[in-house]
Image (tube, rainbow, N blue to C red):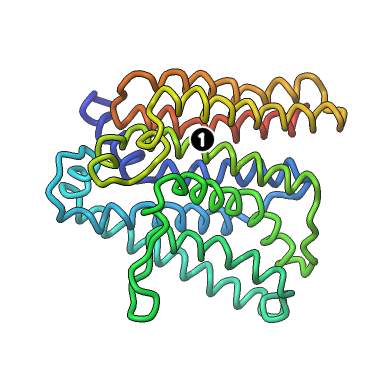
Amino acid sequence: MSLRSRNALVHIIFFGNYFYGICAIGLSIEAALQQGFPLDSVFYYIALFAVTVLYYTKAYVQETLVPTSNQRLLWYRKHGQLVKLSQLALIVIILAFGIYLMMAYPQQILHMPLLHWILIMVFPLVAGLYYGVENKILGKYNLRNIGWLKPFVIGFVWGGLVSLYPVLYYDIVHDLPYQFTSIGCLLFLKNFMFVTVLGIMFDIKDYAMDHNKELKTFVVKVGLRYTIFFILIPLCILGLGTFLTYGFTHNFSMMKILLNMVPFILLIQVAFSMKRRRPILYYLIIIDGLMLVKAVFGSIAMIWF
């Protein structure tokens, strides 16, 4: 494969948000293994991939007409037809999965407990509010305008998507009640924190734009150095400390603990690297790639150790 072809493939995977879909599958598999649940059907993971890519691509499709020098937006402008076809295919996949569920599990869906409905709906609702609503009653409102809240919203939605949904889907198709467990709650918090830190790192990338828009993200409010040393690093250490406490008190093997520590150590290392200006692909490959690293190491630890 030529260099030009490799670059084109990299841009499709990362600019096209397909990598987010891969990360969602990986983290969901890790979550199921860590909670002691069998893996869900291949149809579930295909639909999960489609929903994730569709959601992330939506924002960039809407902004292609805005004058910009942003490398990612320029890619969308150049490959608009490909993106539209991709979005259409993803919508078809999601609709097909919905029809499959209604046909295969009608009684389980119609008789789901209220708790199931609440847990299923809360994360799409928050994800929708992140992009915003605009009508005569509610006015114009979106969570992205609350700068410091942005990464926590992203972390919350990802935490639910990859930690709760695999278990909820398994319970629904097997007609089982959902039960809160300590490992489930801890895993949600761990994924919530992990993705929140990644979101704060992305705010560093957008510092100049957010500053011009007067969007009060952490880095705009307190500066780069304070964000790294007093927000990012403490959050990383807190997440690592929480895991170590749980691992030692539940008699995890040393190899399982070490494997699960790797993503947190890399997260801290990447946090220090944010002192230098980085190109957009660094964020998409290295920073977002930490989600896949976490999924791979966590899954290996559960399967073999």
Classed neighbour count for the residue bearing mark 1: other residues with Cα under 10 Å, few (<14), some (14–19), many (≥20): many
Residue at the spot 34% in from the left edge and 53% down from the top edge: 57
* Nearer the observer, 118 or 207: 207
Instruction: Say if 218 sits above or below 43 in the image.
Output: above
Q: Quadrant of residue 221?
A: top left
**Number of numbered tags placed on the structure image:** 1
Residue at x 35%, y 36% (from the top left corner):
220
Above or below residue 167? Residue 115 is: below
Given residues 235 and 260, the one toward you in this image is 235
> Split into 4 quadrants, where in the image is the C terminus?
top right
| Quarter location, residue 246 | top right
Query: At 33% across and 46% down in the image, what residue appears?
Result: 215
Residue 302 place in picture, x, y as percent? 74, 33
Residue underneath mark 1: 197
Asked whether 82 or 272 is in front, the reply is 272
Indicate the secondary structure of the residue bearing disc 1: helix
Q: On screen, 170 above or below 1?
A: below
From the top left corner, tell me how far across and down residue 122 is, in percent. Answer: 58, 64
Provide residue 170's location: percent of width, then percent of height: 71, 60
Identify residue type, mark 1.
Val
Q: Residue at x 52, y 55 (%)?
A: 48
From this view, report whether residue 187 is shown above or below residue 284: below
Q: Quadrant of residue 252?
A: top right
Relative to 9, is 108 on the left or the right?
right
